Amino acid sequence: MTATTANEKPIRAALYLRVSTNRQAEHDLSIPDQRRQAERYCEAKGWQVVAEYVEPGQSATDDKRPEFQRMMDAALHGGSPFDVVLVHSFSRFFRDQFQLEFYVRKLAKADVRLVSITQDLGDDPMSNMIRQIMALFDEYQSKENAKHVLRAMKENARQGFWNGALPPIGYRTVEAEKRGAKIKKKLEIDPIHAETVRLIYRLALRGDGDSGPMGLKTITKHLNERDIRTRDGGRWGIAAVHQILTRTTYIGEHRFNTYASKAKRPKPESEHVVMAVPAIITRDEWQAVQAHLKSRNPKWTPPRTVSGPTLLTGIAFCASCGRAMTLRTGKGGRYRYYTCSTRARQGSTGCGGTTVPMDKLDTAVASHIEDRLLDPRRLTALLSEVLNRRDDYIARRRTHITELRQRASEADAKLKRLYEAIENGVADLNDPALKGRVAELSAIRDQAHSDAERAAGAIERAGPDLTEEKVKAFAGTARKRLRKSDGTYRRDHLRAVAQRIEVIDKTEARIMGSRTALLKTLTAASAQTAAGGVPTLELKWRTLKEKVRTLSSRCWRNGSATSRT
């Protein structure tokens, strides 16, 4: 044992004890063992333990550790409270060679040494070199371990098992199988919060029945005003809504290993692992929302394309380069043309797109919509698939309403049994666990009732059933209202049924539209008719720069549109 004289002060030691994960901290004996060995080491050396810093569940690959930073702050700015930092091994201090040497030198400037119990070295150059070599091996081992752990987690995800952490809202974990002592879990749909996810998508696509499609800020405001809470009972923020609307998890494809947390950047798509989970929304809905979000992005949709006076401004695009067709004039404004914006800026070397007289393209597009698209038989054929999906949607909502009401009834029955137990003196109302259970069941019942009401409202907003007579009435009224009394066309009426015009050359263009938007227009008109009004097309319009199904290919010659099919 190293002894000290009466006039010599004992060396003061600060113990730094660390394990890598919370699981180790809860179940492992490593920290108590590190403490016991450190105290025995100090006793043998005659050192005095003056401080202890315990770091449960923190990696040593960086310095983002609360207790580590508190220890360094005390060593460097605390008036020299200790002379030695004692660790079990250098890997407890750092598993990064550069960071280890950096902090060893900072401690040295404050006259504090780093000492390892199991790797006892001196301060000479040879000892410093050996410490650096050990640190390199620790760093290598740490990276190898991380690589193998990640590989196992990726394979776990490929097999459809959850790797831990909090599942996305709308899902909950459920035990799937047991392999030895390890329990494998998968994601299943949480019926209560899944309805909130579906609501957010409905608001983004269709709005609340009066507003039209909503943006992120409006959706957030809508949820908070109606006291629809997040999973943990908090209020919604724009970032949380955006994450729900852009996450592929909700179409059954949860992506794992997408972000490098240390580098703080997304990983390339080739490193992603797609994990199969139950879908909450359809792929068509998800794709439509992505197109809607993109159309509202100022980087993609200049404000002038929404408010411009020209009939096809904002929906006419060059088929060659995909950029907008802009208005150009000639002969002092006597002639007006749609021109590819890339060609207008860069000439024919930028794009081989074309220039088309404005009145010729306007007339061809509007005439074709009047003559072909607004034909009752063609409308019925175009919308048959969407109508089938609409019926399926309503059937799913009704099934979901039944599940929610059953969940509310079950929670209510459990509450009644608890109240009976309290009345009969079997249970104590002052029991904290009982109070918590009553609050939990009450929340489940109220949330299920609320979600069932919202789902029922969604069915009502789907509108009345569409009959052949209603389609015919809509087509006739729409044709009349599309053209003004002076022979020109109504801009908003045209855009209610066509969202994109791709100009191929001077004789051909494609009219593209969304069947869902067309159905919404038709349903709104039918609802007005059912209420005793006249069916109209006066809907709020927003630009939809989306890749949608091509309704038909068109060409025009001498100002008249003809079908190529």
Image (spheres, grey):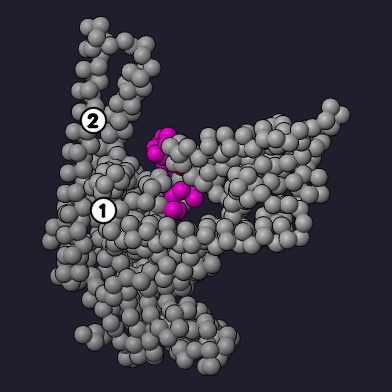
The reply to whether residue 207 is in sight is no
Residue shown at the point (45%, 83%) measured from the top left: 321
Residue shown at the point (73%, 41%) measured from the top left: 84
The reply to whether residue 161 is in sight is yes
Residue 528: % across, % down:
26, 50
Residue 361: % across, % down:
39, 82
Going by the numbered disc 1, the residue's amino acid type is: Pro
Compute the Cα span from label 1 to label 2: 23 Å
Looking at the rendered image, the quarter that the C terminus falls into is bottom left
Residue shown at the point (31%, 33%) measured from the top left: 447
| Residue under pointer 2 | 408
Q: Which residues are magenta?
A: 222-243
Is 501 located above or below residue 479 in the figure? below
Residue shown at the point (24%, 84%) measured from the top left: 563
Is 348 located above or below residue 56 in the figure? below
**Helix, strand or loop under label 2:** helix
Residue 137: % across, % down:
57, 61
State yes or no: residue 534 in magenta.
no
Number of the label disc, if any, that sits on residue 253 = none
